[in-house]
Image (cartoon, coloured by chain):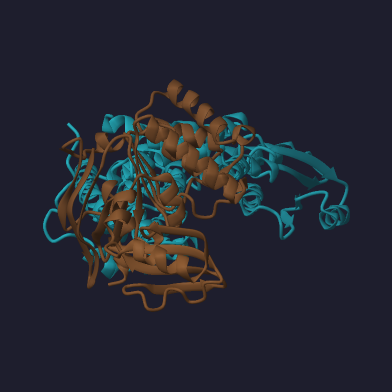
Chain colours: A cyan, B brown
Amino acid sequence: MSPLRTVRLIARRDFMERLRSRAFQISTGISLLLVVGVVVAPTFFGDVAGLTATVGVVGEDPADLVAALEEIAPPGATIDGVTFPDEAAARTALEDGTVDLVVTDGAVLATSETPSSFLAAATSIVAAQRVAERATELGLTPQEAADLLSAADVPVERIGGDGAPDLAAQGIAFFASVIMFIAIVTYGQWILLGVVEEKANRVVELVLGAVLPRRLLAGKIIGIGALGILQLLVVGVVGFGAAIAVGATGVPTVIGTIAGSVILWFLLGYALYATAYAAAGSLVSRTEEAQNAAFPLTMIVMIPYLIAVTALTGGSDLLRYVSYVPIWSPIAMPVRMAAGDAAPWEVAFTLVMTMATIYVFVRIGGRIYEANILRTGAKGSLRVALRSLPARPSPRRPRDR
Amino acid sequence: MLRLTDLSKTYGDVVALDGCSFTIERGEMVGFLGPNGAGKTTTMRTIFGLVRPDSGTVTWDGASITPDVRLRFGYMPEERGLYPKMPIDRQIAWFAELHGMPAGRARDATARWLGELGLSERTNAKVEELSHGNQQRAQLAAALVHDPELLVLDEPFAGLDPIGVESLAGLLAERAAAGTAVLFSSHQLDLVEDLCERAVIIDHGRVVLDGRITELRAASRRRYIDAEVVGGGAWWTGLDHVEPVHVDGDRVRLLTDVDVDLQRIVDAAAVAGTVRRLSFEPPSLSEIFREAVAT
């Protein structure tokens, strides 16, 4: 039988049985709820589209104030204006919370909850009025007063990049690092548990009576990896759909540009850590020990993740050095790429180094797995694992032609 | 034909196999006997490439066993194990496919074997939901489903009730009659004697006896006389080369050897009392076994 068919049969079993398992369905359901929640929740808390504010003016028409505030408010915000007969009525309304800000006789009344941007806008409007009044008192013509005021418009120019810092890209970079970390740790643990389960209930003896260990390992890694990608895609598509549905503008275009690099680095990171998790699983004999076996690997993956989430602005030197370490590149590089901080040579360099490391890991991890998968009883350790590596290439079983 | 030649394997200071050699023909059912730790399981695992011997070879039909050849073998390991959460029909069909059967034939063979083993009612059940006896049957189905040319079963009768023993014995005899080479280990020596023509006895990693059970018994120099002599008393005292093994009233089991003058013994019994019964038999397989592994 062709090795390909064997590997496919094993991959299919691991894919299908896990897909059918209640645990997988529940974890996918929770992921979907979480991603939809993260995308949709802000609209409920009025951060973006649902903002409403009421502003008042004592004894005057509030139209000018409303117009000025609408200019600085986020798109979709509603600003209502009211007129108060006297200051006492305005103060009562503020205390009751029916109004957020009141302008009266050259002063601004606000509460502790009034957004500071509103307060600043209202203050500058009042200040401009007072300056204009004072200018008239000093004998300036209305034209001269306007000239004087226009001097207060200070031009602002941001230097560097394409202008404004790309906040959306940084947000996506943050999500990229979270997704890479969770995906590699989760799917790595699936492999580890799958290996330990086969070993603990001894079915591995029956399977290996018919299949070479490295084909079993290859099938398991491919099957679980395929299911992992399916889960990522489903969660990603649903999250994307939810973002479009609630009109979170800007997100779709950014996701489009980084999706490719996230998927590429996920495949590399998964390939890198999959054999490591399988090798760790082969060292223990009981499911109870599986968490202990996974712990060191999870810690290793966590280092670039923590550095990435704390260095969100991009351009962090520490994150840059970490991204050069092949075992950490898959988590650090997509973050740097999303933040627009990675030079093309860096991308090429880390890709090559990571692929070389994958080759080494597959060789060593596969060897540890082969040497330990049939061992039972004595608890495995790294020392045992290293001893299990033959000093010279071991005599192979005859290959099928 | 399966041929094991001079297999040796040590684990640290422990010698598991020490020049183990024997053969099994197609259509032959061989009982594989030996005390605990003699090397039976290691030998079986070597056949499936699960143990790499330090030296020695295993061949099938004269050629070394490649992964493809091994697909034509069926195995029931000492430590039973299937995927606990996978329904048995899907699982057995998967094992059939893993042994090279096309999907359609794998499904048909699974249905046939589950029916034959009395599991038709439970095809959708997960393995972990099955009783111990039914798990054992499912394990057997995994070994048989792809119609193997060689069937290797490690302690297949352990834990079965007498009815289960009988139906498994019948099934194995049927497979051997159909041309399968069958090797199974067991500590139930009476069962092996009933079921097998041939036995291989292993001790300390090497084969100490190998042959047709009737010939092994006949080859022994020991003979047992079972006699019932009414009113004979201790009629055997004074006879040379005759030792009582067990005395129960008028009945006695005597140990003697193959060259003894049987006529003289019969005469002594007849003179002493009324002979109701007297047999002269080679040792049973259990006795042969104890003799062979005593040293």
- Residue A328: x and y in percent read 31, 54
Q: Nearer the viewer, residue B160 or B53?
A: B160
Q: Against A259, is A160 above or below?
A: below
Image location (x, y in percent) of residue A195: 41, 51
In-front residue for pair A228/A344: A228
Assign the N terminus of chain B to one quadrant of the image. top left
Which of these two is toward me, B29 or A155?
B29
As drawn, the residue found furthest toward the left would be A392
Say which residue appears at 31% left-offset and 73% top-offset: B241
User: Along the line of sight, which residue is nearer the eye, B141 or A303?
Assistant: B141
- Tell me which residue sits at (38%, 69%) in the image: B255
Can residue A23 be seen at all in this image of the molecule? no
Residue in view at x 35 percent, y 44 percent: B197
Q: Quadrant of the C terminus of chain B?
A: bottom left
Residue A202 visible within the image: yes
Q: Is residue A91 left or right of residue A267?
A: right
Rendered residue at 49%/32% (across/down): A252
**Quadrant in the rendering for residue B286:** bottom left
- In the image, taking residue A322 as reference, residue A401 lies left or right, namely left
Q: Is residue B6 above or below residue A168?
A: below
Q: Picture coordinates of residue A41 (x, y %)?
A: 65, 43
Q: Tell whether B22 sits left or right of B113.
A: left
Looking at this view, name the residue that lies furthest to the front: B271
Q: Residue B100, image x and y in percent?
A: 34, 29
